[in-house]
Amino acid sequence: MSSGQGMTRRELIKGAAAGTVVASGALSGCAPTAPSDLPEKWDEEADVVVVGLGAAGAAAAIEASRAGAKVIVLEKAPVSGGSTVLCGGLLYMGGGTPLQKATGFEDSTENMYDYMLAAAGAGADPEMIRIYCDNSLSLYDWLVELGVPFKESYLPGKWAAVPTEDGLAYSGNESQAHFKAVAKPVPRGHHVEGPGETGSVLWPFLKAGVEAAGAEIIHEAPVQQLVVNPEGRVVGVVADVDGIDEYYKANKGVILCAGGFAANKKMVARHCPSFLRSEFQVGTSGDDGSGIRMGQGAGGDVQMMGDPFGYSAIYEFGQALVKGVLLDDRGRRFVGEDNYGTWVGKLLLRDHPVSYLIVDQAIWDEIHEAAKKALTVTAQADSIAELAQAANINQDVMENTIDFYNEHAARSEDPTFSKNAHYVVPLENGPFYALSYPAAGVGFFTTGGLRINGKAEALDPFGETVPGLYAAGRNAFAVTAEQYPGSGVSVCEGLTFGRIAGKAAAAMEAWS
Amino acid sequence: MSSGQGMTRRELIKGAAAGTVVASGALSGCAPTAPSDLPEKWDEEADVVVVGLGAAGAAAAIEASRAGAKVIVLEKAPVSGGSTVLCGGLLYMGGGTPLQKATGFEDSTENMYDYMLAAAGAGADPEMIRIYCDNSLSLYDWLVELGVPFKESYLPGKWAAVPTEDGLAYSGNESQAHFKAVAKPVPRGHHVEGPGETGSVLWPFLKAGVEAAGAEIIHEAPVQQLVVNPEGRVVGVVADVDGIDEYYKANKGVILCAGGFAANKKMVARHCPSFLRSEFQVGTSGDDGSGIRMGQGAGGDVQMMGDPFGYSAIYEFGQALVKGVLLDDRGRRFVGEDNYGTWVGKLLLRDHPVSYLIVDQAIWDEIHEAAKKALTVTAQADSIAELAQAANINQDVMENTIDFYNEHAARSEDPTFSKNAHYVVPLENGPFYALSYPAAGVGFFTTGGLRINGKAEALDPFGETVPGLYAAGRNAFAVTAEQYPGSGVSVCEGLTFGRIAGKAAAAMEAWS
């Protein structure tokens, strides 16, 4: 996956062209409400009910079924896969996976932990990151056992989405000076084999795993309510099946894996309004926050609702573009162009909604023709002064910025942002190009959600568990805090905590 | 008030010296838990129970009592006033108040609304801002009737805290180019009469109003639980009085006015972790989020928990400082120095934790001796180059920044950030000073909280009211969204929605 969830590379950068990616047909009207009391009669019965069938739901269903539980999975869309099927097929794993070893990289769980803790920034939860890292080697094996293919090859460079069939690539900020100081840089972006975006390759293996494990999958069954018994335990769900309320009993637990809330503009406005500037939700129309809200309704707390993943990647259209200079509409630089796209994305959304990547003819010549067609050239001119006028950027500021950049770039230095030396070259020979790089084009999905503990149990605002309720994937907050550590974390969060939830729910004592 | 809540000006800028301001003595251990069921016996009975006695609680108690309700106010501290008593005594009111008129300013409710809606930024709720503005003239009269004094004088300049006895000042971004375009600039910072910070002048009038209205105030009675009846209605509270659980019945409603969560580091880490970088909580140790969490526990949703108020004001120590140039540790400017301090504060916390205000001798000479003592001079040198070295700022970047600034400042222009012309002068004659301006010194309090509607009724995640539950002040989200419109908004939010809550609760039908 390019960025934790799916998008084509074209969509990643082109706000104008992009919109909500709808994975499935029209959904049944999904209007979740407060919990239901016990019904007079249950329509179906299971040990574990899983709400939503993407990566997290699949992992939960597989593990719960393998542990002997009877599992029913309710998916509101006519097809399963959620955002996972749309993703780029990148999975952020490490600690010394067979693929890392085969391609000559030495990693350790501790080294991975050190990077992720630092990269997640303020608010990172050491316990959750520890669990993510400790489970990473076994997650790789688990995927391989399910048949998920990874090619034993390493793709040099920096990739939020791997455009080739290669198996391993850098997908985060591991090589940035700031993080090199705390952990040895190692690539951890494991790319499911296949050309480019391979969420569609990954997904069938997960779905087949659910079926092989014996879980029952019911499509077009949007869950509208949790059922809570008089003792406050979540004991089932109500799904709308063909317009009729069907009651599904969960003897052991309900696992919410119903995605984030990026498709729900009212929730975005209430929790993270800067992201209203994005016109590019990454995910499906099913990411309506219904799972999060149902979990809240049963007593669950939420966490980090204000800090979504926002992604804008310069290098998606060719690594040469990292040699460009990113300016806001005043002509100021505001970030090192080689930073991971989530750092760039948030700055665009919050502070620099109108921005441009400035490149010279030499850089432009390095870009593939197909990529050129996907870029928006706002202006082209023979000099920086003319380019500023044509793009409506303040000419004095822009000339000063470029002159200063060029002066130091002649020595491969970037004193302002410490961009990696091999990307630092003067922009000297025109024509020059101003490529549009708007906040509207920042791809986003939400990473906040229900507050869970290391067992994927939902917690209430007082730190107590909500009995019978689990959550994973974008329905929950897990490891991505102030920053997103690297492409492929989101799906792996879903898989890791989905697996944990499935095992934990299956091991619960039945309430009836 | 300096910033919506209380702090001395010294504290405002000095991270090192600042810490949590504790308004009250040691609080009883406050560990809120999930709601209680109905008790066998109630210890006390009222129509309306108000939790917390600051501005919001006082307003609620006054209005509910005046409407004929029997009101009990439970305050966990041994003294009342919360953050309000510590605040600077600035109140953000407008629409053509008698004080605005007397000092020669023409405002209208519509003009105020236009400014506030724009200034609150993304996520601003037009309905709530409308209510705030529509109630502003009557709020002014209400305060004057309570005896709150305002001097009929206008203090020119830009003030987050009014250091004089003057009654009216600009306290927001009204004169910034961006906002001038949408609303006529008018000062709306109404300063309670008295020298400098006058929250301590304001508070006794509010408290006397509560007593005069007939409400009963009980101190050292931390509320630990809401009581919810089998139908899901909030019908009372449990307070810990001298170690004993006392049950207070609320026949009509419970109004949560127990403050924000800035004093609760775990909640800050879970919702707005960038603010962990601040070492300066503005408010009291009672801002532990207990009211918000109890409201959640009864079914309430939360809103905007990720976007607190973070304030750092250059001009607090003298307006001349706005003529300085604010640089991060690389030597880059990142904001116009005349921006409202909340814009500066958030940028410091998120992206520029180590920053310096650069001034020359001429500016330094304009600063009062007392203010000089409160500033931290990181470095002093005869040239910008030497200053950069002494302060460990990148010399090339800093020289380029200052040279470019000076070149345009000679024409009173700031093409980079459009700082107001009267603040734009070249920094030419040394010695030069680098004044420390760290993220650690950003004063912050939280503005997110329970989601309420225009009647101050708590809403659940599905948009339904939580029966019997109201919230106001920093216990609730109201009008401050992505940005904070101006100093004095927070206390007025508390007063406005506290009044609304008090009236609404008193008008409710009793449940028993």
Image (cartoon, coloured by chain):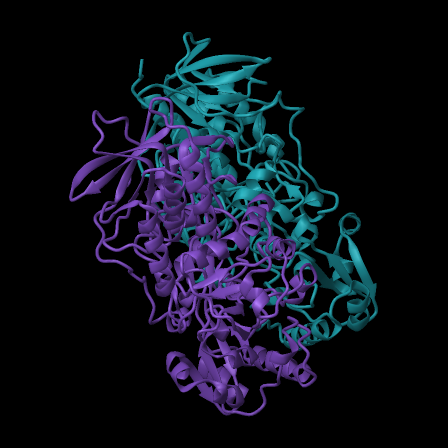
Chain colours: A purple, B cyan
Q: Is residue A340 above or below residue A263?
A: below
Q: Is residue A406 above or below residue B310?
A: below
**Can you give x and y, in whole percent of width and height, for residue B426 in the image?**
70, 71
Do we see residue B172 in this rendering? no
Closer to the camera in the image, B337 or A3: A3
**Can you give x and y, in whole percent of width and height, for residue B375 in the image?**
76, 51
Residue drawn where x is 29% and y is 60% of the image: A23
Residue drawn where x is 49% and y is 19% of the image: B73
Residue B81 in the figure: left or right of residue B236: right
Q: Is residue A13 above or below residue A388?
A: above
**Can you give x and y, in whole percent of width and height, for residue B346 in the image?**
57, 53
Closer to the camera in the image, A250 or B202: A250
Task: Report the quarter where the C terminus of chain A lies.
Answer: top left
Closer to the camera in the image, B95 or A109: A109
Task: Report the quarter where the N terminus of chain A lies.
Answer: bottom left
Q: How many marks?
A: 0
Do we see residue B388 in this rendering? yes
